[in-house]
Image: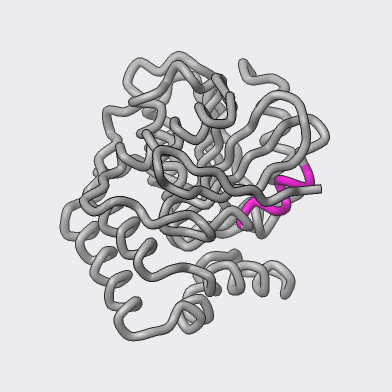
């Protein structure tokens, strides 16, 4: 059974969901998500792991990020949360925006990661500047012209594969409807300006790259590019899934993660 908790880290309130016991597994949600994105993982993997899913600053019940924050500040905030909870070393799994953050966390706090799993994500800064600018402008325009609920209704079909069931669609739409515009706006700007292309150079810990077969947001070529940049990384394709593979196909996703964590060396 998951529990929701609140903690103050360096004057900033952070909220998170936690379930299970065992080696700690920390989960980082995407730009349109929050800790509830990981409900199926909290339920499905907590028999073997102490699972922690945070609300990043600006999301859920967590305070907004500081003015002028860059990606490194989110990474240091996460390190502060782990310090406050007494978690010295963790398995880290990030999805999409959370996967970019996980790369930056490795750059700054790599000694704290036992294994690194990157789902439905890419190397920030690898796309042409005009593509990054267009993506940012589209997100900011949506914030200016729609409510979070309207954004969620429009955006959800693009986040899943063709065979997504009604329960998954409803869960994803409800989650995205909960975004806070200020937090989403800041995360979007940070993502557009981030560059993680050198973050994993020389990485020696076990890594897993996960991709949804029908991901329209992060095309498989970008996931494959990320995989190729990590020597020895394992690769997993979630059949039938779109961008939110862990929500849309949780059983398949959880099986892949469980197998990797049990046999990180392949």
Q: Is residue 214 visible?
A: no
Q: What residue is rendered at 34% in x and 76% in y?
A: 143
Q: Main secondary structure of the magenta part?
A: helix
Asked whether residue 112 appears in the rendered view, the answer is yes
Residue occupying the point 17% across, 59% down: 130
Magenta span of residues: 37-44
Residue in the foreground of this view, choosing between 187 and 208: 187
Q: In this picture, is 49 found above or below 217?
A: above
Q: Is residue 24 above or below residue 238?
A: above
The answer to which quarter of the image holds residue 227 is top left
Residue 240 within the segment the image draws in magenta: no
Q: Residue at x 79, y 30 (%)?
A: 48
Q: Position of residue 64 (x, y in %)?
A: 38, 57
Image coordinates for residue 247, horizontal then vertical, percent: 65, 57
Could you say which is closer to the camera, residue 107 or residue 215?
107
Q: Is residue 26 left or right of residue 249?
A: left
Of all residues, the one furthest to the left in this rendering is 130
Residue 250 location (% of width, % of height): 72, 51
Judged left or right of residue 40, residue 25 is left
Query: Is 42 in the magenta?
Result: yes
Quadrant assignment for the C terminus: top right
């Amino acid at each position: 059974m998951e529990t929701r908790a609140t903690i103050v880290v360096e004057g900033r309130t952070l909220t998170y969901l936690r379930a299970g016991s065992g080696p700690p597994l920390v989960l980082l949600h995407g730009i349109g998500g929050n800790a509830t994105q990981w409900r199926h993982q909290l339920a499905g993997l907590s028999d073997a792991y102490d699972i922690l899913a945070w609300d990043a600053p600006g999301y859920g019940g967590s305070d907004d990020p500081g003015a002028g924050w860059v990606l490194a500040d989110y990474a240091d905030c996460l390190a502060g949360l782990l310090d406050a909870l007494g978690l010295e070393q963790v398995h880290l799994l990030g999805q999409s925006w959370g996967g970019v953050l996980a790369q930056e966390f490795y750059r700054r706090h790599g000694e704290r990661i036992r294994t690194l799993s990157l789902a439905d994500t890419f190397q920030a800064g690898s796309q042409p500047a005009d593509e990054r600018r267009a993506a940012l402008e589209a997100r900011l325009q949506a914030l200016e012209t729609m409510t979070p609920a309207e954004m969620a209704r429009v955006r959800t079909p693009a986040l899943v594969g063709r065979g997504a069931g009604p329960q998954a669609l409803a869960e994803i739409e409800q989650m995205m409807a909960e975004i806070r515009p200020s937090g989403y706006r800041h995360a979007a700007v940070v993502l557009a300006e981030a560059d993680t292309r050198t973050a994993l150079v020389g990485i020696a810990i076990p890594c897993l790259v996960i991709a949804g077969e029908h991901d329209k947001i992060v095309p498989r070529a970008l996931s494959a590019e990320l995989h190729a940049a990590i020597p020895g990384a394992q690769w997993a394709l979630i059949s039938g899934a779109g961008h939110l593979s862990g929500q849309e196909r949780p059983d398949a996703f959880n099986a892949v993660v469980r197998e990797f964590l049990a046999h990180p060396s392949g």
